[in-house]
Image: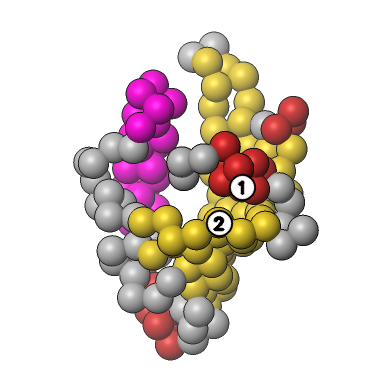
Amino acid sequence: MGSSADRQRIRDRGARLRFRHAREAARCVWFILQHEPERGSVEILKLTPDVTACKLSIRLAPSFRGTDAVVTYSHTSIGPHGDAFVAGFTEEFYERFMRDWESRMNHYLVTGGSSEAGPMKKQRMEGVQSTG
Protein backbone atom coordinates (compact mmCIF):
# COMPACT_ATOMS: atom_id res chain seq x y z
CA MET A 1 0.00 0.00 0.00
CA GLY A 2 3.10 2.07 -0.06
CA SER A 3 2.60 5.80 -0.29
CA SER A 4 0.92 8.06 2.20
CA ALA A 5 -1.38 9.27 -0.62
CA ASP A 6 -2.61 5.67 -1.11
CA ARG A 7 -3.22 5.29 2.63
CA GLN A 8 -5.18 8.58 2.68
CA ARG A 9 -7.39 7.48 -0.22
CA ILE A 10 -8.17 4.25 1.62
CA ARG A 11 -9.41 6.34 4.57
CA ASP A 12 -11.77 8.31 2.34
CA ARG A 13 -15.42 7.35 2.24
CA GLY A 14 -16.15 6.03 -1.23
CA ALA A 15 -12.56 4.93 -1.85
CA ARG A 16 -12.37 2.09 -4.35
CA LEU A 17 -9.70 -0.60 -4.13
CA ARG A 18 -9.14 -3.50 -6.49
CA PHE A 19 -7.60 -6.80 -5.34
CA ARG A 20 -7.16 -10.25 -6.79
CA HIS A 21 -6.83 -13.23 -4.46
CA ALA A 22 -5.00 -16.33 -5.61
CA ARG A 23 -8.08 -18.43 -4.87
CA GLU A 24 -10.44 -16.13 -6.80
CA ALA A 25 -10.60 -16.03 -10.57
CA ALA A 26 -12.24 -12.59 -10.67
CA ARG A 27 -10.85 -9.25 -9.59
CA CYS A 28 -12.55 -7.87 -6.49
CA VAL A 29 -13.54 -4.25 -6.05
CA TRP A 30 -13.77 -2.92 -2.50
CA PHE A 31 -15.71 0.25 -1.61
CA ILE A 32 -15.33 2.05 1.72
CA LEU A 33 -18.93 2.63 2.82
CA GLN A 34 -18.28 4.13 6.22
CA HIS A 35 -15.07 4.89 8.14
CA GLU A 36 -15.19 6.34 11.65
CA PRO A 37 -11.74 5.89 13.22
CA GLU A 38 -12.75 7.73 16.40
CA ARG A 39 -15.43 5.06 16.94
CA GLY A 40 -13.23 2.17 15.77
CA SER A 41 -15.63 1.39 12.96
CA VAL A 42 -15.42 0.65 9.25
CA GLU A 43 -17.87 -0.84 6.73
CA ILE A 44 -16.75 -2.06 3.34
CA LEU A 45 -18.55 -3.50 0.33
CA LYS A 46 -16.58 -6.12 -1.61
CA LEU A 47 -17.93 -6.83 -5.06
CA THR A 48 -16.66 -9.90 -6.89
CA PRO A 49 -18.28 -9.67 -10.34
CA ASP A 50 -20.63 -12.55 -11.13
CA VAL A 51 -19.88 -14.10 -7.72
CA THR A 52 -20.87 -12.15 -4.59
CA ALA A 53 -21.51 -8.81 -3.01
CA CYS A 54 -20.09 -8.88 0.50
CA LYS A 55 -20.58 -6.35 3.28
CA LEU A 56 -17.73 -6.41 5.79
CA SER A 57 -18.15 -4.59 9.11
CA ILE A 58 -15.34 -4.19 11.62
CA ARG A 59 -15.92 -2.68 15.05
CA LEU A 60 -13.10 -2.23 17.57
CA ALA A 61 -13.66 -2.08 21.32
CA PRO A 62 -11.25 -1.85 24.27
CA SER A 63 -10.85 -5.00 26.32
CA PHE A 64 -8.67 -6.18 29.19
CA ARG A 65 -6.36 -7.78 26.57
CA GLY A 66 -6.05 -4.56 24.56
CA THR A 67 -8.56 -4.31 21.71
CA ASP A 68 -11.21 -6.71 20.49
CA ALA A 69 -12.47 -6.67 16.91
CA VAL A 70 -15.99 -7.73 15.99
CA VAL A 71 -15.88 -8.75 12.33
CA THR A 72 -19.04 -9.49 10.38
CA TYR A 73 -19.24 -10.75 6.80
CA SER A 74 -22.53 -10.84 4.92
CA HIS A 75 -22.35 -12.47 1.46
CA THR A 76 -25.04 -12.23 -1.22
CA SER A 77 -24.73 -14.40 -4.32
CA ILE A 78 -24.96 -12.60 -7.65
CA GLY A 79 -24.36 -15.60 -9.91
CA PRO A 80 -23.86 -19.37 -10.08
CA HIS A 81 -20.29 -19.14 -8.75
CA GLY A 82 -21.66 -17.11 -5.87
CA ASP A 83 -24.23 -19.79 -5.11
CA ALA A 84 -21.38 -22.29 -4.71
CA PHE A 85 -19.32 -19.85 -2.62
CA VAL A 86 -22.20 -19.05 -0.25
CA ALA A 87 -23.00 -22.77 0.13
CA GLY A 88 -19.36 -23.39 1.10
CA PHE A 89 -19.21 -20.49 3.57
CA THR A 90 -19.97 -22.78 6.49
CA GLU A 91 -19.36 -22.12 10.16
CA GLU A 92 -16.25 -24.34 10.00
CA PHE A 93 -14.91 -22.44 6.95
CA TYR A 94 -15.63 -19.09 8.63
CA GLU A 95 -13.82 -20.08 11.85
CA ARG A 96 -10.75 -21.25 9.88
CA PHE A 97 -10.85 -18.12 7.71
CA MET A 98 -11.14 -15.82 10.74
CA ARG A 99 -8.30 -17.55 12.62
CA ASP A 100 -6.09 -16.90 9.58
CA TRP A 101 -7.41 -13.32 9.30
CA GLU A 102 -6.75 -12.67 13.01
CA SER A 103 -3.24 -14.10 12.79
CA ARG A 104 -2.40 -11.97 9.76
CA MET A 105 -3.84 -8.79 11.30
CA ASN A 106 -1.98 -9.34 14.59
CA HIS A 107 1.25 -9.94 12.64
CA TYR A 108 0.73 -6.69 10.74
CA LEU A 109 -0.05 -4.72 13.91
CA VAL A 110 3.12 -6.01 15.62
CA THR A 111 5.53 -5.84 12.67
CA GLY A 112 3.99 -3.36 10.23
CA GLY A 113 4.46 -5.91 7.44
CA SER A 114 2.42 -8.60 5.76
CA SER A 115 2.59 -12.23 6.80
CA GLU A 116 3.54 -14.91 4.30
CA ALA A 117 1.67 -17.56 6.28
CA GLY A 118 -1.77 -18.86 5.58
CA PRO A 119 -4.01 -19.23 2.54
CA MET A 120 -4.42 -15.48 2.04
CA LYS A 121 -0.72 -14.82 1.33
CA LYS A 122 -1.19 -14.38 -2.42
CA GLN A 123 -3.46 -11.34 -2.13
CA ARG A 124 -2.23 -8.58 -4.41
CA MET A 125 -3.35 -4.98 -4.51
CA GLU A 126 -3.87 -3.76 -8.04
CA GLY A 127 -4.88 -0.17 -7.42
CA VAL A 128 -6.41 2.39 -5.16
CA GLN A 129 -8.75 5.04 -6.49
CA SER A 130 -10.87 7.58 -4.69
CA THR A 131 -14.33 8.20 -6.06
CA GLY A 132 -15.08 11.24 -3.97
Q: Which residue is mark 2?
A: 128
Where on the picture, by quarter, is residue 30? bottom right
Where on the picture, by quarter, is residue 59? top right
Where on the picture, by quarter, is residue 83? bottom left
- Specify the farthest residue to the top: 64
* Rendering colour mode: secondary structure
Picture layout, residue 70 above or below residue 126:
above
Visible residue check, residue 122: yes
Numbered tag placed on residue 111 in the rendering: none
Q: Residue 4, how many percent across, how many down?
A: 57, 37
Q: Residue 90, how many percent across, how many down?
A: 38, 61
Q: Amino acid at mark 2?
A: Val
Contact (CB < 8 A) between labels 1 and 2? yes
Q: Where are the magenta residues, as a range? A: 92-113
Q: Which residue is mark 1?
A: 10
Q: Quadrant of the C terminus?
A: bottom right
Q: Residue at x 73, y 51 (%)?
A: 13
Picture layout, residue 65 above or below residue 85:
above
| Other residues around mark 2 within 10 Å, as few (<14) / some (14–19) / many (≥20) | some
Q: Which numbered disc, 1 or 2, marks the residue that appears first in the sequence?
A: 1
Q: Nearer the viewer, residue 127 or 34?
A: 127
Q: Is residue 65 magenta?
A: no
Q: Residue at x 43, y 71 (%)?
A: 27
- Specify the farthest residue to the bottom: 80
